[in-house]
Amino acid sequence: MEKIFPSRVPKNSRCLITGASGFIGSHLAAALAAAGNEVACLVRSSSRTDFLSSLPVRLVSGDCRDRGSLRAAVSGADYIFHLAGAISAVDRKTYFDVNAGGTKNLVEACLEWNPALRRLVYVSSIAAAGPSPRGHSVSETAECSPVSDYGRSKLEAELVVRGIGNALPWVIVRPPNVLGPRQKELDESIELLRLRIRPLVGRKSSRTSIIGVWDLVRALLLVAGDDRAIGRTYFVTDGTPVSWRDITAAVARAAGMSGFYLPVPFPVQYAAAAVAEWIARWRKRTPPFTREHVVAARKHDWVYDPGAILSDLGFRGEMDLTGVAAQTIAARSHKGTGVTVQLERTNGHG
Ligand SMILES: NC(=O)c1ccc[n+]([C@@H]2O[C@H](COP(=O)([O-])OP(=O)(O)OC[C@H]3O[C@@H](n4cnc5c(N)ncnc54)[C@H](OP(=O)(O)O)[C@@H]3O)[C@@H](O)[C@H]2O)c1
């Protein structure tokens, strides 16, 4: 399985990725390295680096919560992709320390030690914008009303990035639920499906936007290399909202798993999340999911309009849910990065 990524980031660029040991960052690292760039990945001593070790990338130590530790990483980078973040935490403080405080530290480090940076790409989230009204999609011009500590901390990080003004060329990308290989929740639901257990996440009628991780990486490469993206904020979705149940059904179909599944209703999910948080607090770990996640999926719709990045840069998601589910299942038994990157002509925008 070979993915083709058109890229406007010029070959041999020095790229730094924060959050490269995570799900999305690892795919981005593979794509940037395959394009012939010098890729540095910010990692902590506790980061799992087994996948990154298989790539031609350099590991640089640092923690976003410690500004001084970012100096070596940011110095000399042409492009910085800031993906490091807390998605699942047991308390508000962790979300704000990592997402908002970590972004502030990175921005200050760039301003002080790398004022010639060509692009800072910040990966925010739809959670910063808040849920969508029933039956409508939200565009980038809508007022933000986050409903979770995660969302509020991502919005605060966005404000820090916008506060850069013209001092550095920045762009903000807000993905919805990102699906693909190495995504923890997807891996967990595949394991549950194998046990014939199917969590009934959300209501039947609730809808969420999605994006395949390969499409998101394509979008990140595009906004990094195109000057028309500077100072803009973009939702990046595949344009087709689905229900949470559609996602597990697509994964089950792709894995050839049919038959009876034990449904897990909301109260049981909520109780399981409370237990997961309690265990995580006790073991000083990240919970796999939280009560905030379970409630957000049940109570709200999360549907966003991908029109701005389409009209500004011509970006359109190419893979739908069925395609992403099939490729995710296929990739579970596939070794290697499976990516090829084609450099696009920059048309003077790179
Ligand atoms: N996955 C989605 O569906 C989704 C949707 C919208 C937005 N996003 C955003 O996309 C970004 C990446 O998400 P993901 O799904 O790839 O997350 P992930 O798999 O949980 O990875 C998070 C990454 O952030 C790093 N990190 C956490 N705290 C850090 C710190 N203090 N200093 C340096 N690095 C730190 C982690 O490093 P360790 O390995 O050391 O823990 C890891 O590499 C996040 O900012 C998230 O908010 C994700």
Image (cartoon, rainbow, N blue to C red):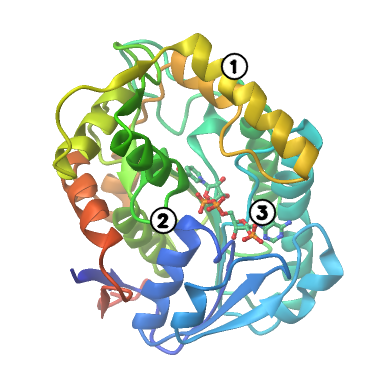
* Residue 43 in picture, x, y percent from top left: 66, 70
**What whole-number distance in Å separates the C-alpha atoms at marks 3 and 1?**
44 Å
Would you identify the image quadrant in which residue 166 lies? bottom right
* Residue 35 in picture, x, y percent from top left: 34, 82
Would you identify the image quadrant in which residue 8 lies? bottom left
Give the amino acid at mark 1. Ala
Q: Nearer the viewer, residue 320 or 198?
A: 198
Task: Look at discs 2 and 1 and give the one toward the viewer.
Answer: 1
- The mark nearer the N terminus, 2 or 3, is 3
Q: Quadrant of the N terminus?
A: bottom left
Residue beneath label 2, please?
182
Q: Mark 3, residues whose alpha carbon is within 10 Å: few (<14), some, or many (≥20)? A: few
Say if disc 2 is inside 8 Å of ligand 1. Answer: yes
Q: Secondary structure at mark 2?
A: loop
Q: Is residue 114 above or below residue 36?
A: above
Would you identify the image quadrant in which residue 330 lies? bottom left
Task: Look at discs 2 and 3 and give the one toward the viewer.
Answer: 2
Residue beneath label 3, please?
165
The answer to whether residue 350 is seen in the rendering is no
Q: Is residue 134 above or below residue 29?
A: above
Give the amino acid at mark 3. Gly
Q: Secondary structure at mark 1?
A: helix
The answer to whether residue 270 is seen in the rendering is yes
